[in-house]
Amino acid sequence: MTHTKAYAAQEAKAPLTPFSFDRRDPGPHDVAIDIKFCGICHSDIHQARDEWGGASFPMVPGHEIAGVVSAVGSNVTKFRVGDHVGVGCFVDSCRTCPECQAGIEQYCATRPVFTYNSAESDGTPTQGGYSERIVVDENYTLRIPGNLPLDAAAPLLCAGITLYSPLRHWNAGPGKKVAIIGLGGLGHMGVKIAHAMGAEVTVLSHSESKRADAARLGADHYFNTGDPDTFTSLARSFDLIVNTVSAELDWDAYIRLLKIDGAMVVVGIPDKQVPVGAFPLVGGRRSLAGSMIGGIAETQEMLDFCGRHNIVSDIETIAIQQVNEAYERVLRSDVRYRFVIDLATLNSK
Ligand code: NAP
Ligand code: ZN
Ligand code: ZN
């Protein structure tokens, strides 16, 4: 066991404070990783505040992990000491169900073992990336391309794959009109990736303030959803809309912005039920769908795609001691566009 420094929430809604716990020693198939950087995903806040129910404490959040391999187990073949690696939202799954066999382990029928707020098969609680190290099976460890800086690559492990997967599944590419609702951590990755895939990209944002940024990130168009004209002028415009917002929105109004046969894919997770009418769907043979992160193979494909296109997140790096303030700023949409914790600061006063 290795003593590991971290920051944890001791109970729902409590501020995160210094905490330590033991990580297992690497087994034959494990990779030990010195965590260098960890992104702050809005899901960390939802879970540290128990907004989805069933949270377990103490909780060390963090599932956008980038680091360097410090040791490998005797049977590890994919990684060596010194490699740049990442860990995303899950660290294991049953490996035998049809979903695991198909490489979509995020939908494991038994339930994937999430990186934190979950339990290993032996019952040990999992703890996330706001910590100095982690030990993960090599089959659930990702390789970060050498040309990508570890700090700005960290958010690819959740925000990046959460947008890449639906963009691929619904065939974003040349000739396709794609809209991204919400220019936050997820949304800004969606703009960069959809643009690199060759789609025509529109940002639907709830204020004017990100217009210049959207263009810089690769968006072709920007509309303020606070302006009612947006919804009349864009009717029947998009092949695909990816909704990254967790605030309550009128989904019907957005579904009407789809072309015939278009799809709106929900990735943001509101804590309340959203009412949806039949008419906007029926009246355009439209689909309303959801999507959750991506499987291990697809996450590696996304990292390699980002390596080829030089795509990383726009980040603001913080010390771990600033994490509670950063949470408040995420809730105010006051981040351009992802906070990343520098874990070296765990050792500063
Ligand atoms: P974020 O950085 O806070 O971005 C959310 C964006 O939503 C904001 O930047 C803002 O964009 C928009 N927004 C905020 N308040 C709004 C309001 N009142 N009305 C309309 N729009 C508003 O969060 P994130 O990390 O991208 O995560 C977004 C959601 O996705 C969270 O619910 C998270 O749990 C979920 N998530 C899901 C998955 C998955 O696998 N499905 C994975 C990761 C995260 P504008 O200012 O541009 O409007
Ligand atoms: Zn996340
Ligand atoms: Zn499974």
Image (tube, rainbow, N blue to C red):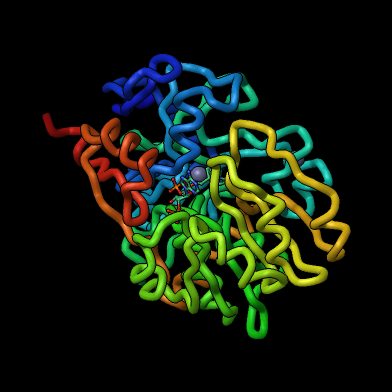
Farthest-out residue, bottom: 175
State the quadrant of the C terminus: top left
Q: Nearer the viewer, residue 294 or 167?
A: 167
Image side of residue 139 versus residue 42, left or right: right
Residue at 37 percent of width and 46 percent of height: 333
Image side of residue 92 versus residue 330, left or right: right
| Residue 44 position (above or below residue 148) | above
The x, y position of residue 106, in whole percent, is 67, 45
How many numbered circles are shown? Answer: 0
Image side of residue 51 versus residue 310, left or right: right
Q: Nearer the viewer, residue 321 or 296?
A: 321
Q: Nearer the viewer, residue 101 or 322?
A: 322
The x, y position of residue 135, in whole percent, is 46, 37
Farthest-out residue, left: 349
| Residue 156 position (above or below residue 199) | above
State the quadrant of the N terminus: top left
Tell me if residue 300 can be seen: no
Q: Nearer the viewer, residue 75 or 146?
A: 146
Residue at 79 percent of width and 41 percent of height: 96
Tell me if residue 115 can be seen: yes
| Residue 4 position (above or below residue 31) | above
The x, y position of residue 346, in whole percent, is 22, 34
Residue at 54 percent of width and 48 percent of height: 245
